[in-house]
Image (cartoon, helix red, strand yellow):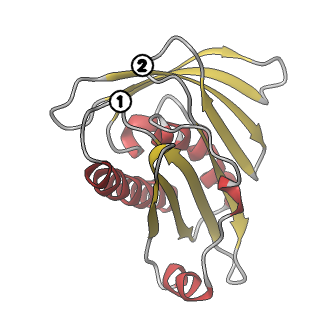
C-alpha cells in the first residue's frame, strides 16, 4: 500500500539509510508526522523522507502497509491498486496503481514490491506504466515506548512539466496525510 506513495519515484541509492534525528524522534513520540523533502538536482524532482509513530500492534500496521485492495482509503491521490501477479511464497508481487493528482491526468504505474514480513516493504517501477523507473521503501521499527515507527523513503520524479519545488510541496503534503491516514486506520475500530 505505502508503495503507492512512491508511484512517481526514481531509483536512488541509500534511501533506506535515513533515520529521524533525535529532535525529530521527540516530535514523532509527541504524535507528529515528520516529512523531509530534499532537492535532487539532475536526477529527480526530490527525495522524500518521512516517519510516523503508531501506537498499534505491528501486525496491524504491517497488514495496512502491504494491503493493495484498501490502499486508496489510506494513500492520498491513489485511485486504485490491483495485484497483477504474486510470487509463490508471497514475498513479492506486481501491482498496477492508478494515481490521480488534483487536476492533472491520471497516471498508470506498474510496481514490483518485495517484502520482509513485519520489517520492510520495497518497491520499484516496471516497464509498461507511465513512469519508467522508481524506487523506495517503507520500514517498520519498534520505538522504546512500544509504538511502531513507520519510516518511508523514496526519490520522486514527476512526469508533469511543473517546477520541482511545487512537486516537492504537493508530495510532501500527500505523504504526511497518507501517514496520518495510516495511523488512523491502524488505531481505529
Residue 132 is left or right of residue 141, and the answer is left
Q: Position of residue 25 (x, y in %)?
A: 58, 82
Q: Residues within 10 Å of mark 1 (few under 14, many from 20)?
A: few
Residue 164, how many percent across, how many down? Answer: 32, 49
Rendered image: mark on residue 159:
1
Q: Residue at x 55, y 68 (%)?
A: 54
At horizontal 28% and vertical 52% (from top left) the residue drawn is: 170
Between 146 and 188, the one lying in front of the other is: 146
How far across and how far down the image is residue 80, in percent? 39, 25
Q: Position of residue 144 (x, y in %)?
A: 72, 83
Residue nearer the viewer, 130 or 61: 130
Give the residue furthest to the right.
89
Is residue 46 visible in this depiction of the protein?
yes
Left or right: 107 in relation to 61:
left
Q: Which residue is mark 2?
A: 130
Query: Is disc 2 placed on a helix, strand or loop?
Result: loop
Q: Is residue 189 visible?
A: no
Q: Which mark is residue 71?
A: none
Amino acid at each position: 500500500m505505502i508503495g503507492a506513495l512512491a508511484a512517481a519515484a526514481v531509483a536512488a541509492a541509500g534511501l533506506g539509510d535515513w533515520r529521524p534525528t533525535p529532535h525529530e524522534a521527540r516530535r514523532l513520540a509527541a504524535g507528529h508526522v515528520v516529512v523531509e523533502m530534499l532537492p535532487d538536482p539532475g536526477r529527480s524532482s526530490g527525495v522524500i523522507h518521512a516517519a510516523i509513530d503508531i501506537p498499534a500492534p505491528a501486525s496491524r500496521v504491517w497488514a495496512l502497509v502491504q494491503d493493495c485492495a484498501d490502499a486508496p482509503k489510506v494513500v492520498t491521490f491513489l485511485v486504485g491498486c490491483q495485484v497483477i501477479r504474486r510470487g509463490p511464497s508471497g514475498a513479492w508481487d506486481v501491482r498496477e496503481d492508478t494515481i490521480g493528482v488534483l487536476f492533472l491526468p491520471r497516471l498508470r504505474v506498474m510496481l514490483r514490491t518485495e517484502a520482509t514480513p513485519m520489517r520492510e516493504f520495497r518497491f520499484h517501477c516496471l516497464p509498461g506504466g507511465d513512469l519508467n523507473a522508481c524506487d523506495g521503501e517503507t520500514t517498520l521499527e519498534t520505538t522504546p515506548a512500544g509504538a511502531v515507527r513507520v519510516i518511508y523513503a523514496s526519490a520522486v520524479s514527476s512526469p508533469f512539466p511543473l517546477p520541482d519545488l511545487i512537486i516537492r510541496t504537493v508530495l510532501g503534503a500527500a505523504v504526511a496525510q497518507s501517514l496520518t491516514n495510516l495511523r488512523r486506520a491502524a488505531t481505529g475500530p
